[in-house]
Amino acid sequence: MSPQPDLRALPSIDALLSTPEAQTLCGQVARAFLTGTLRSILDEHRRALQSGALARVPVPDEIMAEARRRLEVHARPALTPVVNATGVLVHTNLGRSVLPEPVIEAIAAAARAPVALEYDLVTGGRGERDRVVEEDLAALTGAAAATVVNNNAAAVLLVLHALAEGREVIVSRGELVEIGGSFRLPDVLAKSGARLREVGTTNRTHLRDYEQAIGPDTALLMKVHTSNYKVVGFTRAVAIDDLVALGRARHLPVVEDLGSGALVDLAGFVNEATPGQGLGAEPVVRTRVAAGVDVLTFSGDKLLGGPQAGVIVGRADLIDRIRANPLRRALRPGKLALAGLAATLRLYRAAPDVSAVFPLLRAVARSLESIEETTYEAAELLRAALGPDYRIALVESECEIGSGALPEAVLPSRAIAITHVSDGPDRVARRFREAWPPIIGRIHDGAFLLDMRAITDPSAVVPRLPG
């Protein structure tokens, strides 16, 4: 049995801090932070020596090299930038939509300096933060008024609390959706203080179901766009025009949760390789306002391609009630989200071609010819980088929008299938995740796939070692 290493041979914190490398690092990070990093390294080495996992005492140069590596890792963004080659364009786990450059610039400008967030530059008095987006929202949607909170779930919660607390809200049973993270509409409704009144069945709801459910305690009629699933077969849903007419006749507001929401007709963004095949029917906010829906809620960070936000548009008197609700202050967005949303809306109004500005729309409208060209170039780079133990193949793929939007829409795409002579696809995927930046793909039919619809730089999918 080899002798136990002498733990006393481990260098002290003071000895390490006196090294030239430590002096250099102290010019880059706080001395206390470097000290804590060195202490953690020494503690780990001490335990490894005691357990036999480490055979010898590391020298100061080795410890300082490890400290530098950890400090470099710590200096990276806490939210790690990744390459999205999953084939899901708006991936919730990867932060949803990538923002256009003008939106990024607007957010950065708001971060660098004080801004007139709730300050009226004309009167010199207190202003309203909604003013930075309300005019553009009115122009884009046709609504009389608008307000913004931090996400669409918050928008639904606030609307229900402001307009229906203590009273009934009538919703079709087939529209009681569950969104990501197991958040269910009935739970949000219950937290708002309103009472759910379900009508119809899972697959069929008639106008008479709403009519028969209306009573003295009814506060509003609610419709929920089932953006993350479809019920097919023997189905029936009440058209929005009919629900609005019923609301008018019974003097009840109609509220609709559009979920993702869209400011433009996405069916118009057609993949060039499949002429005539659009993205299916996703309600455009303006058409719902024109149909007479009293209050609409939708997201700012899904199909809109902007920052996370929950947008509420509708009748001025109802929006005033929503603004006056105390819960709104707890749910309001900060200046960075508002700056980003305002820039997003201005692009929709002013850009000559929104598909050229928004990364999501650009990926949707991209031709198969362009995707194939990038895929071929990336495959050649991967063959050179990975070596002979990896097999690289170009395969057909299908891409989806993601984030609960357009669940039936499938876009043709191309992908690179990667296999290894001995390692399984999980280990291959792990190697790509360990690159810098991490490259995220998907596993399919025993291979690790890199979908290329959202990738325009072939070198982006070539893994680089961290550090």
Image (cartoon, rainbow, N blue to C red):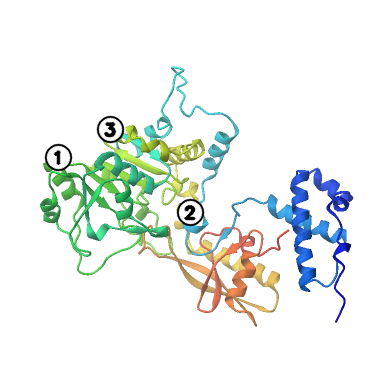
Foreground pick, 362 / 207? 207
The residue labelled by disc 1 is 251
CA distance separating discs 3 and 1: 16 Å
Q: Residues within 10 Å of mark 1 (few under 14, many from 20)?
A: few
Under mark 2, the amino acid is Arg
Find residue 380 and report its horizontal and vertical position in percent: 65, 69
Vertical position of residue 170 compared to residue 385: above or below: above
Identify which residue is drawn at 80% across, 71% down.
54
The residue labelled by disc 3 is 316
**206 left or right, relative to 394:** left
Vertical position of residue 144 compared to residue 119: above or below: below
CA distance separating discs 2 and 3: 31 Å
Quarter of the rendering containing residue 146: top left
Identify which residue is drawn at 50% across, 78% down.
445
Find residue 123 and report its horizontal and vertical position in percent: 43, 17
Earlier in the chain: of badge 2 and badge 3, it is: 2
Disc 1 secondary structure class: loop
Q: Residues within 10 Å of mark 3 (few under 14, many from 20)?
A: some
Q: Which of marks 2 and 1 is in front?
A: 1
In the picture, which quadrant includes the C terminus?
bottom right
Disc on res. 96: 2
CA distance separating discs 2 and 1: 39 Å
Find residue 202 and report its horizontal and vertical position in percent: 22, 64
**32 left or right, relative to 462:** right
Identify which residue is drawn at 64% across, 61% down.
459
Vertical position of residue 218 compared to residue 209: above or below: above
Q: How crowded is mark 2: few (under 14 residues within 10 Å), some or many (20 or more)?
A: many
Quarter of the rendering containing residue 318: top left
Q: Do the residues labelled 3 and 1 touch (CB within 8 Å)?
A: no
Earlier in the chain: of badge 3 and badge 1, it is: 1
Foreground pick, 3 / 453? 3
